Amino acid sequence: MDLGLKEKVALVLAASKGLGRASASALAAEGAFVTIGARNKQALEMAAQHIQRESGSRVLAVPTDVTKEADLAAIVAATTQQFGHIDILVNNAGGPPSGTFATVGDEQWQAAFEMNFLSAVRLIRLVLPHMRPRGSGRIINIVSTSVKQPIEGLLLSNATRMAVVGLAKTLSVELGPENITVNNVCPGRFLTDRIRQGHTVKEKMAQGMSEAEALNELAKDIPLGRIGKPEELAALVAFLASEQASYITGTTIQVDGGLVRAVF
């Protein structure tokens, strides 16, 4: 299937590793020109070189902290200067720390809001002027299965990512007449640094398990019986960015091996 992404311009955040990097790789493999942003300059540039070498497409690396408004403006400006326009935005950011209502204060709430919600608001605001004149656009937010089924101990993520879903649904109605689609992708458990370094894996390893054994334990309640591969989520991101997904908007789709038991 030709996804119609050749020479489309994509901006992908938190893309030096994990799900962001896999999404950028998938888009570049389909022929899109890609700008990637992340805080670690060295890791980001290495990722850009790898993606460009594997895909043969053009990749621009711009160090970016999604909580800094000036950084977001800079990466959008660099993208349009390099490629002329923006067709696809993939909003992505790291997850806030674990905690319960009794253990997190205003400072932690504000930080989570800035990272997971306000970054998406700001980026969408910045890219829309570049999508509207072209009469189309794709906005894809990488959130979490917590928007379908809250995850114990992740209060900040559960709350702020749900706000992104509300934003996306509202924008899908507002932007539909302009042929700009807005969708959310909800990753379950994927083999990334985040899950390897998560408190659950660390606790099990502290009890004497190897990392492989700890990950196998995490997979026991997943119907497909395994942790996901980042490229499996990236395939959905590429599809939602494509011409083939032109009639899909306002959706929130989990990629989780069947982990979430909710019907909707």
Image (spheres, rainbow, N blue to C red):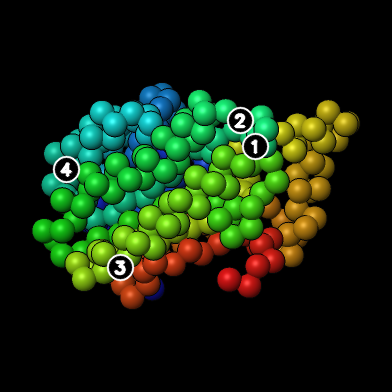
Crowd class of label 1 (few under 14; some 14 to 19; many from 20; radius 10 Å): few
- In the drawing, what numbered circle is on residue 129? none
Upstream in the sequence, badge 3 or badge 2?
2
- In the drawing, what numbered circle is on residue 80? 4
Instruction: Please state which amino acid type lies under the numbered disc 2.
Output: Val
Q: Which residue is mark 2?
A: 104
Residue drawn at x 19%, y 67% as measured from the top left? 178
Instruction: Measuring from the top left, give residue 102's x and y in whole percent.
Output: 67, 33
Residue drawn at x 68%, y 52% as measured from the top left? 227
Q: Is there CB contact under 8 Å for labels 1 and 2?
A: yes
Q: Quadrant of the N terminus?
A: bottom left
Specify whether residue 168 is in view.
yes
Upstream in the sequence, badge 2 or badge 4?
4
Could you tell whether 153 is left or right of 95 in the image?
right
Could you tell whether 195 is left or right of 182 in the image?
right
Upstream in the sequence, badge 1 or badge 4?
4
Q: Is there CB contact under 8 Å for labels 2 and 4?
A: no
Q: Which residue is mark 1?
A: 101
Instruction: Please state which amino acid type lies under the numbered disc 4.
Output: Thr
Could you tell whether 118 is left or right of 96 in the image?
left
Could you tell whether 7 is left or right of 169 in the image?
left
- In the drawing, what numbered circle is on residue 173? 3
Mark-to-mark CA distance, 3 and 1: 33 Å
